[in-house]
Image (spheres, helix red, strand yellow):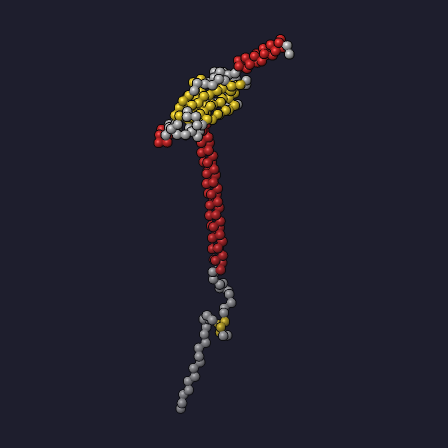
Amino acid sequence: MTPLFLHVILIMCGGHILYAGANRPAAPVNVSITHLRADSATVSWNIVDVDVVIGYAISQQRQDGLAQRFISEVNTTSRACVLWNLDEDTDYIIQVQSIGMHGESQASKRIHFRTLEKSDHFQSSLMDQDDPSVEGLDMTRQLQTGEMVIVMTVLIMWAAVIGLFCRQYDIIKDNDSNNHSKEKAKPPSEHSTPDYHHGGLLGSKFQRTASSISIIKV
């Protein structure tokens, strides 16, 4: 292999590296931590090369070095991410990178934050509505609440229909029973045949009187 050929290869490799580096997105700016809680926090940032960024990567580690986590997401235009499962009253360090078609950007400045204690957790209930991730969570809760309202309304309507049907059925059943009882209790007709008992007519208006015979002695 001649020195000239090696020189050409080095030039080509160097040009490719320079091209890839030139097309990588710039590092995120204005990285900040909001909505700090005992077990979670929201990291947000701004990007410079909007057209070439297709995702982000976040490096999260405890300041004491005991735990480290790497979060990466592509095909998104989000500029915020919620960090979950954090330890309370613990120091963390994060850095954010932009992901482009030709690689990742340089890491942003290191951001330090400390999670709250559980006793101070109530202070984090005041949430900033401008946070995109929080808006998404609120929208999900609203959708779930709306679905539950619809389901409960349908169940109540079905219960009302079934109750009305049962009530109408009981009314019809009671009417049929009353009509049947009236037919059984109807008095006999005036033209019905009178009953006889031991050859005698019961209830007859004419009854025979015993004949009396008087004997006169002379």
Q: Is residue 130 visible?
A: no
x 58%, y 13%: residue:
13
Rendered residue at 47%/26% (across/down) = 69
Picture coordinates of residue 203, whole percent (x, y): 46, 70
In the rendered image, the residue lying farthest to the top is: 4
- Compared with 159, 28 (above or below) is above
What is the count of numbered marks?
A: 0
Q: Is residue 140 visible?
A: yes
Seen in the picture, residue 106 relative to 155 is either above or below; the reply is: above
Could you tell me residue 214's position as x and y percent? Answer: 42, 85
Picture quarter with the C terminus: bottom left
Q: Residue at x 54, y 17 (%)?
A: 102
Residue sitting at the far bottom: 218
The image shows residue 67 at horizontal and vertical percentages of: 45, 27
Does residue 156 lie above or below 114 as drawn?
A: below
* Residue 28 spot, x, y in % from top left: 46, 18
Task: Name above or below for residue 15 compared with residue 137.
Answer: above
Front-lying residue, 24 or 90: 90
Q: Residue furthest right?
A: 1
Q: Quarter of the image containing the N terminus?
A: top right
Q: Residue at x 53, y 23 (%)?
A: 75
